[in-house]
Image (spheres, helix red, strand yellow):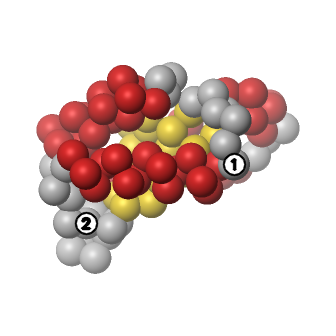
Amino acid sequence: MKEVLQKVASFIKEHFHAQKVILFGSYASGNPTEDSDIDLFVIMNTTMRFPKQAAAIRIEIDKHFAITKPMDIIVRTPEFVNNRYKEGDFYIKDILEKGMEL
């Protein structure tokens, strides 16, 4: 699965000009179960609303990759991430510190 996710991350970086793609959650911590979903945190500049940009990325992933596991994609801008990290946002800190950059 990690090899496929690496290819997905490269695809996102190339086609959407993402700065970083971070795997987080159970796949990043190495303990996924059969019911685990794939959690990706994408840091990129975008003028689209975050959920709409995430949906656009997911549509393109579905066109190019045969991933059968549910996938959650969260998109945030570098400025948003930096500001929230500095403010001590636990969720952002957890992703950045415990996630696996692909």
Which three-letter amino acid code belongs to the residue tagged 2? Lys
From the viewer's perspective, is residue 26 above or below residue 74? below
Q: Position of residue 79 (x, y in %)?
A: 75, 27
Q: Mark 2 or 1 closer to N-term?
A: 1
Single out the residue that lies furthest toward the bottom.
35
From the viewer's perspective, is residue 74 above or below residue 46? below
Instruction: Kindly report the distance in space between the C-alpha atoms of the residues bearing marks 2 and 1.
Output: 25 Å
Single out the residue that lies furthest toward the right.
87
Q: Position of residue 61 (x, y in %)?
A: 31, 48
The residue under label 2 is: 69
* Pair 2/1: label in front: 1
The residue under label 1 is: 49
Viewer-nearest residue: 9 or 27: 9
Residue located 28% across and 39% down the image: 8
Secondary structure of residue under mark 2: loop
Q: Position of residue 64 (x, y in %)?
A: 21, 46
Residue located 67% across and 43% down the image: 48
Residue located 43% across and 46% down the image: 57
Is residue 24 visible from the viewing direction of this image?
no
Q: Is residue 90 left or right of residue 28?
A: right
- Number of numbered labels in the structure image: 2
Residue located 80% across and 32% down the image: 83
Secondary structure of residue under mark 1: loop
Badge 1: residue crowd in 10 Å (few <14, some 14–19, many ≥20): few
Is residue 48 visible from the viewing direction of this image?
yes
